[in-house]
Amino acid sequence: MIRLNDYLRNEFGCKVYKISLNGGFTCPNRDGTLDTRGCIFCSGYGSGDFSEDAWKSVYEQIEDGKKRVEAKMPGQGQNHGYIAYFQAFTNTYAPLERLRELYTAAVSHPDIVALSIATRPDCVGEGVLKLLEEIDQIKPVWVELGLQTIHERTADYIRRGFKLDVYDETVRRLKAININVITHVILGLPGETREDMLETVNHVGKSGSDGIKLQLLHVIEGTDLADDYRQGLFECMSMDEYVELIYDCIKILPDDMVIHRMTGDGARKTLIAPLWSLDKKRVLNSINKRLSVLT
């Protein structure tokens, strides 16, 4: 297991912070191409609840993000590196010239050491691949693919909108041009057993992906998932169950895979469940204590 902070320090030689940017994107699951409702768990911010304001320029968003780091950790955000993270919605889903404009603005900022792009595997066409390869010559490019699960019955329930082989092929094509790939997985999706979740994690470990984000399922106000939760159609995991699951996930992942996330942040004002996840420090301490036996 390689922890993200260790990987970043080794890669860039300094402490690195991530700044979530908003490029004003939408998603084929929202604009009517595939659906208009979005994925069942997705908030109205397209998982970009902590992103900067889309109406500002990329440079302004980066500067605002730097100020946020400094406000939270005085003295810790200065003279360090930053990752420009296009997070909200599907960040390769726009005309190529618009993508080039946004990506170039991000990597042109002197304090940015890498560009990270969250997207769907079905929104990485040939033109996008060529653009990513071009930008990667300027500064490292990471692509975060939202897989969530390998199980088609769950994928249909969450309205994912693409098949597993699309993910597999997209990873292959990205690695063919030496792009760093991170895969997003949600643990605790309704109807999935512990074995189902571990099968997904095992698949990601063998897929060629360089890193993984293990995300606890959050039930967010205003989503269709919240309606199902209120109807009692599923329950969320307890913290103890989640900690033990993370332990089992890490055990089956390759030793050289970078662990980008082991829980997740939910906006306090919109999170319905599980409320124990709001105490992120306690959750991470519990996970780290459980994982200590592996080191």
Image (cartoon, rainbow, N blue to C red):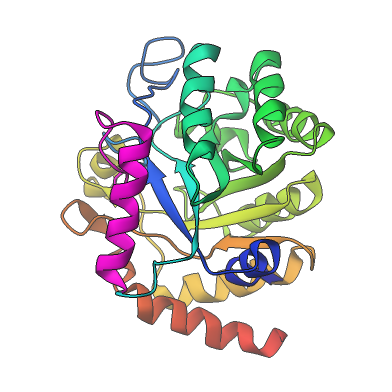
Residue 20 x %, y %: 39, 46
Would you say 78 lies left or right of 229 here?
right
Q: Which residues are magenta?
A: 49-73
Lateral position of residue 73 relative to residue 206, left or right: left
Q: Is residue 42 visible?
A: no
Quadrant assignment, res 162: top right
Residue 128, horizontal then vertical, whole percent = 64, 20
Q: Is residue 192 above or below residue 42?
A: below
Q: Examine the structure image and report whether residue 254 is included in the region drawn in magenta.
A: no
In the orientation shown, which residue stands out farthest toward the left?
Answer: 269
Viewport quadrant of the C terminus: bottom right
Compared across the picture, whether 7 is left or right of 112 comes to: right
Residue at 42%, 22% (x, y): give it: 27
Residue in view at x 48 percent, y 45 percent? 84
Report if residue 69 lies within the magenta region.
yes
Q: Using the rendered image of the protein, determine whether residue 190 is visible from the camera's viewpoint.
A: yes
Front residue of 125/245: it is 125
- On the image, the x and y values in percent for residue 104 come to 53, 29
- Name of the residue lying farthest toward the right: 176
- Name the one closer to the observer, 240 or 101: 101
- Residue 5 at what x, y percent from top left? 58, 70
Residue drawn at x 65%, y 22% as measured from the top left: 131
The N terminus lies in quadrant: bottom right
Q: Considering only vertical position in the picture, is 81 above or below 91? A: below
Dominant SS of magenta comes to helix
Q: Quadrant of the rendered structure where residue 140 is?
A: top right
